[in-house]
Amino acid sequence: MAGPEDAGAAAAAKGSEGGNGVRDGYDGKCVFCRIARREEPGTALLPCEDEDLVCFRDIKPGAPHHYLVVPVKHMGNCKTLKTEHIPLVKRMMEVGKAVLQKNNFNDLNDVRMGFHWPPFCSIAHLHLHVLAPASQLGFFSRIYYRINSYWFITAEQLIERLQTENAAS
């Protein structure tokens, strides 16, 4: 059954239609759209229990476990999200935790999950970074995925920001 997060995802995808080539939630120029549709043979999708999301390993891992959780339908970056996208972000987090556990990582207190804040996004398709163990991030990864920086926002911080925006309006 479609929920409010599905309507929000559809609105975000539809809102990005027009001159940029996004049709039916798909942008053929977006590598994450192609990965989600299994059009990139070099990228293996990991088992994911949510049909609206895909998960795969980051090509430049910042930790022993570094996965990306991505909506199948093209969506803009985290700055474009609205309150109705909170359930989507929570589902992305749950998928990230499940993938870690399936890959024998169970210390969920030693995980960093978050998004790069524009303009510090390399791909303009919403994607959650799931890194573990966070205690083993290398020097550059500690900077690149730094909590409370202006270029990286944790999933929890994003949810809080979206809830605050709703309360303010």
Image (cartoon, rainbow, N blue to C red):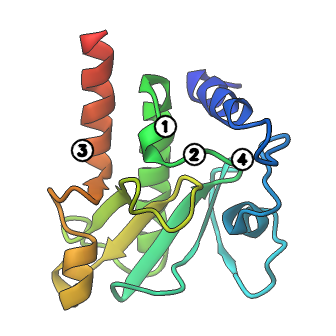
Q: CA distance from mark 2 to mark 1?
A: 6 Å
| Contact? badges 4 and 3 (CB < 8 Å) | no
Question: Residue 68, which numbered label?
Answer: none
Around disc 2, counting alpha carbons within 10 Å, would you say few (fewer than 14), some (14 to 19), or many (20 or more)?
some
Label 2 to label 3, Cα distance in Å?
18 Å
User: Which quadrant would residue 90 be assigned to in this image?
Assistant: top left
Q: Residue at x 20, y 77 (%)?
A: 143
User: Which is in the foreground here, disc 2 or disc 3?
Assistant: 2
The residue beneath circle 1 is 80
Look at the image and tell me in which quarter the C terminus lies: top left
- Real-space CA distance between mark 3 and mark 1, rounded to the nearest whole angstrom: 15 Å
Q: Residues within 10 Å of mark 3 (few under 14, many from 20)?
A: some
Marking on residue 157: 3
Assess whether mark 1 and mark 3 are in contact (beta carbons under 8 angstroms): no
In the structure shown, which secondary structural element does the residue marked by tag 3 occupy? Answer: helix
Q: Which mark is residue 76?
A: 2
The image position of residue 123, as x and y in percent, is 56, 64
Q: How far is mark 1 from mark 4, CA to CA?
A: 14 Å
Q: Nearer the viewer, residue 104 or 84?
A: 84
* Secondary structure state at the residue bearing disc 2: loop
The local secondary structure at tag 1 comes to: helix
> How many dots with numbers?
4
Q: Secondary structure at mark 4?
A: loop
Q: Earlier in the sequence, mark 3 or mark 1?
A: 1
Quick one: label 4 or label 3, which is nearer the N terminus? 4
* Kind of residue sitting beneath label 3: Gln
Name the image quarter holding residue 64.
bottom left
Is tag 2's residue or tag 3's residue first in the polypeptide sequence? 2
Task: Give x and y (percent) for residue 82.
Answer: 45, 28
Pointer 2 and pointer 1: residues touching (CB < 8 Å)?
yes
